[in-house]
Amino acid sequence: MKNNKKRILILPGDGIGPEVISEAIKTLSSLAKRHNIGLYFEEFAWGCGYYLQHGEMMPAEGIDTLSAFDAVLFGAVGDPRVPEPVSISGLSCHSDVASICLLISARTFSIPVLPRL
């Protein structure tokens, strides 16, 4: 039997990030319920606010922590008091825009499609 339980790490980010992530969680939860998938969310307050308090975007063991999850839901990150290279590279994450560009440029690819809702 397929394991339908997924652990998702939530990094709400800064500014508008938490507001957008809150709505994304509601949407994911609704879809998960409809398709009998167990989603377990755990939130970490890593981002520019964390950087301003601790001098780093996440703790030293952050990458190990991230790897224990099935997925990461990552909100917008940024604060005028934190240089952009720090905020982007400090979390060792990549924007989903890169994935979209890769998919658009690929000649052939398959995307799993959920049943019509």
Image (cartoon, grey):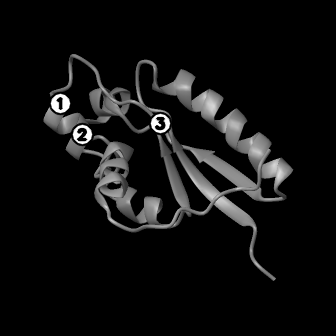
Specify the amino acid type for callout 2: Ile
Residue 23: image quadrant is top right
Residue identifier under label 2 = 88
Q: What residue do we see at 28% from left, 27% from top?
A: 52
Q: Position of residue 108 (x, y in %)?
A: 39, 68
Q: On residue 46, which mark appears?
A: none
The residue that label 1 is drawn on is 84
Residue farthest toward the bottom in the current orientation of the protein: 1
Q: Quadrant of residue 107?
A: bottom left
Q: Secondary structure at mark 1?
A: helix
Q: Amino acid at mark 3?
A: Ala
Q: Are marks 2 and 1 in contact (CB under 8 Å)?
A: yes
Occupied quadrant, residue 76: top left
Mark 3 touches mark 1? (CB < 8 Å): no
Residue 113 in the image: state x and y as whole percent: 64, 58
Residue at disc 3, secondary structure = loop
Which tag, 3 or 2, sits closer to the chain's start? Answer: 3
- Give the CA distance from mark 3 to mark 1: 18 Å
Which of 114/82 is in front?
114
Which residue is at 14% across, 37% downward? 85
Q: Please name the residue that numbered disc 3 is placed on.
A: 45
Q: Amino acid at mark 1?
A: Glu
